[in-house]
């Protein structure tokens, strides 16, 4: 199982793993995870179960998120899952990096526009602003 120390080490010494996640989501996740390792451990358990028993090449981290929500509604448990959809991108990247069995399990999408697209968007905004004057 992935440990707090592994996650903290990864975020500290390989922060580029989260480069394609929106800055706001990364910042929130980094503040959230120290008190919620039980949630990351639950994600890992379900991901391993799905990988071993499933029949697809890729899976959705959000499916696991919804499973955790479902379970927490059914269980009369003190285990409080504070689940934010925005954390899914960070969790999937961390699980695949730290658990070799889960490597490649989730398809990753960049939430950050490539620099040239950002610059093109700024150019378009400037042209629009000039045209509007």
Image (spheres, rainbow, N blue to C red):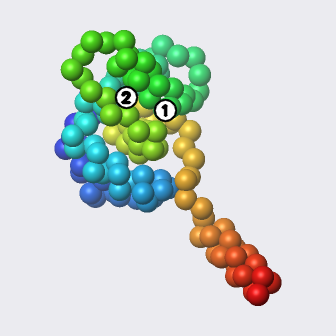
Q: Residues within 10 Å of mark 1 (few under 14, many from 20)?
A: many
| Residue sitting at x 66%, y 68% | 117
Q: Which of 88 and 75 is in front in this view?
A: 75
Q: Residue 90 appears in which quarter of the rendering?
A: top left
Name the spot of residue 15 as percent of width and height, x first.
35, 58
Q: Which of 53 and 78 is in front in this view?
A: 78
Q: Which numbered circle lies on residue 76?
A: none
Left or right placement of residue 72 versus residue 36 in this view: right
Secondary structure of the residue carrying tag 1 is helix
* Among the two numbered marks 1 and 2 on one chain, the one whose residue lies closer to the N terminus: 2
Instruction: Report which residue position mark 2 lands on.
Output: 43
Q: Nearer the viewer, residue 130 or 42?
A: 130
| Residue sitting at x 39%, y 54% | 26
Secondary structure of the residue carrying tag 2 is helix
Image height of 74 relative to 123, above or below: above
Name the spot of residue 49 as percent of width and height, x first.
41, 17
Instruction: Report which residue position mark 1 lands on.
Output: 61
Q: Which of 28 and 99 is in front in this view?
A: 28
* Residue 69 visible here: yes
Q: Do the residues labelled 1 and 2 touch (CB within 8 Å)?
A: yes
Image height of 35 relative to 68, above or below: below
Name the spot of residue 4 as percent of width and height, x first.
21, 40
């Amino acid at each position: 199982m992935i440990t707090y120390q592994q996650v903290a080490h990864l975020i500290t010494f390989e922060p580029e793993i989260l480069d394609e996640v929106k800055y706001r989501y990364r910042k929130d996740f980094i503040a959230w995870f120290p008190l919620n390792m039980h949630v990351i451990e639950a994600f890992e358990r379900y991901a391993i179960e799905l990988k071993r028993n499933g029949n697809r090449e890729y899976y959705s981290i959000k499916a696991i998120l919804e499973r955790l929500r479902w379970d927490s509604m059914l269980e009369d448990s003190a285990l409080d899952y504070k689940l934010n959809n925005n954390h899914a991108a960070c969790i999937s990247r961390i699980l695949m990096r730290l658990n070799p069995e889960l490597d490649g399990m989730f398809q990753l999408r960049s939430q950050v526009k490539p620099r040239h697209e950002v610059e093109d968007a700024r150019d378009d905004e400037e042209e629009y602003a000039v045209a509007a004057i």
